[in-house]
Amino acid sequence: MRQALLVASWLAACAVAACAAPQNDPVTDRIRLVAADASAADAVASMLREYGGYEAWVARHAVEYRYTLSLFAGDPTPRMVTRQVHHIGLGDAVRVELLDIDSDEPQVVSLDGDAINVTQNGAVVDDASEIAFRRTYARALRWDFMTPWNLLDPSARLESRGVRTPQPTGPVPVGPCDVVRLRFERVTEGGGTDDWYDFYISRRSHLVEQIHSYRADAHGYRLAVWSDTRAFDGLRVATRRATYASDASAAAGRLEAVAEYADVRFDLP
């Protein structure tokens, strides 16, 4: 009888524990594959849910939006303003189309994997340096729009860098943020890469406040400050991203550029 009671008690305890155990969701399972610690996984999971959720993101296959890039390079007013319409594939394959608007010499860039076609005023551009620059530029634009969802890339590696309160870049003070460092496992000619991206995720809103990054090839730091987050078809997008020169402490230096997104539409016919 005593043994039967012990078994029943053990089974009941197991049942209670099973009921109390949190159910895993797809985004948490995916993040655990790339996160080095629970703090990083929890912060990123909460952040992605705030941006609309993993299920909503993977259901989207392409996006179109109007893009305005203002280059300041430290000046109080823009030195140059570029306005384009972007069509970007959101799958594993790299597909990007960039169309200039409000330009006297409109350029169209079509990138499919490594294959690229550039035309200007309807004529094919065959300058090798221009084509190489446009290929890099198109890939960078795709990367920027897919952030923060590219933290789920299988080659990504995430680790917690603690809690910090960034310096304000505007009139509204920024509260404490979970800082998660993103690196990628990839091989270069030098055998690896030291590039990294520190995501400052607000503990209040669970949105990205800023991204402090380091590029080893240029030995330079950049600080991207995100704001004006809006919802489009169930997904939220930071529609204003200001990039500053920076240093190892993540201080905002001179304003380099401001990128703005508008009329974001997913999966158009």
Image: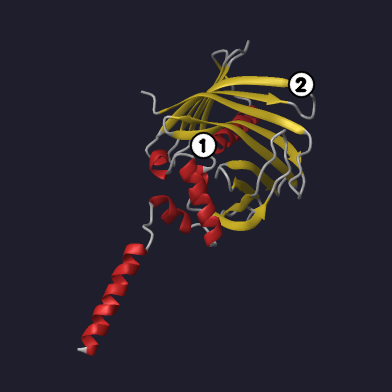
Query: Label 1: which residue?
Result: 114
Amino acid on which the number 2 mark rests in the picture: Thr
N-term-proximal mark, 1 vs 2 = 2
Considering depth in this image, is 115 or 110 the residue closer to the camera? 110
Image-quadrant location for residue 243: top right
Query: Label 2: which residue?
Result: 77
> Is residue 86 toward the left or the right of residue 132 in the image?
left
Location of residue 35 in the rendering, given as x and y in whole percent from the top left corner? 52, 58
Q: Taking 131 as reference, is 219 above or below it?
A: below
Location of residue 151 in the rendering, given as x and y in whole percent from the top left corner? 52, 48
> Is residue 269 toward the left or the right of residue 79 in the image?
left
Q: Taking 105 as reference, is 28 above or below it?
A: below
Asked whether residue 250 is in view, the answer is yes
Secondary element type, mark 1: loop
Secondary element type, mark 2: loop
In this rendering, the label closer to the viewer, 1 or 2: 2
Asked whether residue 194 is in view, the answer is no
Q: Residues within 10 Å of mark 1 (few under 14, many from 20)?
A: few
Considering depth in this image, is 14 or 244 the residue closer to the camera? 14
Q: Residues within 10 Å of mark 2 (few under 14, many from 20)?
A: few
Q: Taking 85 as reference, is 247 above or below it?
A: below
